[in-house]
Amino acid sequence: MKYIYEPAYKLVDLFHQEPDKIFDYIDAVFNRIKSVESKVKSYITLRSYDSVLKEAEEVVLRIKKGEHLPLAGILIAVKDNISTRGLRTTCASRILENYVPPYDATVIKMIKEAGGIVVGKTNMDEFAMGSTTENSAFFPTHNPWDLTRVPGGSSGGSAAAISAGETTLALGSDTGGSIRCPAAFTATVGLKPTYGLVSRYGLIAYASSLDQIGPMARNVHDVALLLSIIATHDSLDSTSIPRIQRCNFLMELLDTMKKRPRLKIALVRELWKGVEEDVGKVLHNVLDKLCSEHMCEEVSIPIVHYALPAYYVIAMAEASSNLARYDGVRYGLSTTKEGRNWIEVFSEVRSKGFGFEVKKRIALGAFILSAGYQEQYYIRALKVRRILKVEFDKLFTKFDVIALPTMPIKPPRLGEAITDPIKLYSMDIDTVLANMIGSPAVSVPAGFANALPVAVQFMGKPLSETTLLYAASLIEEITKLHDLKPPL
């Protein structure tokens, strides 16, 4: 198990001192993948050992020439909706089953420049639509802590790969909790950054005003390390926030940990309703310890009851628009066109290419945007979103962070949640809010209920990532839970 559960920031220091140990590390990870991947099923596409080794040789050469590489040979799993040049990118959908992008997403380009190595593309809910990673067109992913349960979604493959020791770092995407949900269910750490902090160029869209790429790891420091690499202004993304220089979140976190500022923490009453009793017990136990040293106050914001329905109206409307491009003509799944009209071809491609959940959300989105209903649903949801933004902007003038559950329930068994759409959508009740208002949010392990992971979530004002990482680090200090090894 040497190297497998070592923190990335420690491995980077080791590899700069002894670059050739990168090869031993790669051997260890590939042996681990060979050992557990058949049980977990994290990857849709795994790169060959030889291609990874060849890239590692280039990294070692760069280090020996004197380059300082922040990710020096670290293996990174990438969610399969992030474009990777020459490496299949499917979105876990039949419609893109054989799609190979001709370019790298900006985040992939940054990782390669920093010396990181992509090890493979991870499983997900098709087009990121789901919270269990059961909606994949290929196979469901299993939770390393209990193989009969889901790992969360839609970035479940990335979270499971980290938890199982099949990679050191990972990238996910978060539209309504898709990084934080699987992080919570697999006892890993996941950060949804401020909207616009990380470039979305090369991310295959679900709902463009909500989507955000973010880092996932087994500890808070590694999340800060990866965020430092991918958080950069990008002229190719019109929603990218202009920044004068790149921020070293790991150094900022270490500096904040030394200063130990006292946090003002809000507990929004409405965000704690519906939490399972044993999950709530774990969370209250941890937060009681945190609040003994920091200021905590309960507040009420009744409008949050409308966040979940408003989120799904907006997300489905944008999904319907974004997925209209998949017509079997330009790229993706194709079919016989000769002697047939466009409607016949279009209908066949989309019927065969999309899974049930994607078709359902496209249909609902088309209805929401249709004449006579757009004002009643979509415009009203946008108004709710604006009110939520105003209310939480006010709250963040008084508090540094909001503490809330990541997931109100324990990981469901495979097949349990997906059969009940209300239960499936309600899992996101505490995560969609950050996407609606564009704020950053982080999930960090808080403990276990019946041997299943439970996580606490912190949400802050835009560009408060360092504060959130500090709060998450305080939880790690209290629980001593980081770099955890599941009983595989």
Image (spheres, rainbow, N blue to C red):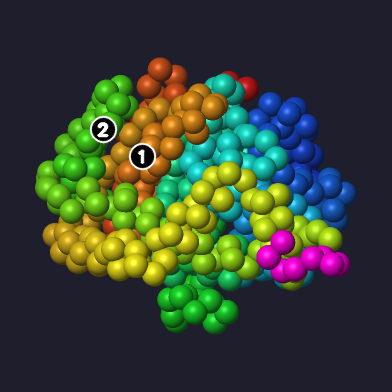
Q: Amino acid at mark 1?
A: Ser
Residue at x 79% of width, y 49% of height:
47
Q: Are marks 1 and 2 in contact (CB under 8 Å)?
A: yes
Q: Going by the image, does 287 lie left or right of 451?
A: left
Position of 482 with respect to 292 (left or right) is right
| In this picture, residue 456 sits left or right of residue 421 | left
Question: In whole angstroms, how far apart are the C-alphas of marks 1 and 2?
Answer: 10 Å
Give the vertical position of 275 relative to 331 (above or below): above
Residue corresponding to mark 2? 274
Q: Which element is circle 1 on?
A: helix
Q: Is residue 147 above or below residue 319?
A: above
Residue 229 lies, in percent from the top left, at 55, 64
Amino acid type of the residue that numbered disc 2 sits on in the rendered structure: Gly
Residue 372, percent across and down? 34, 67
Q: Is residue 230 left or right of residue 43?
A: left
**Residue denoted by label 1:** 426
Boundaries of the magenta span: 337-344
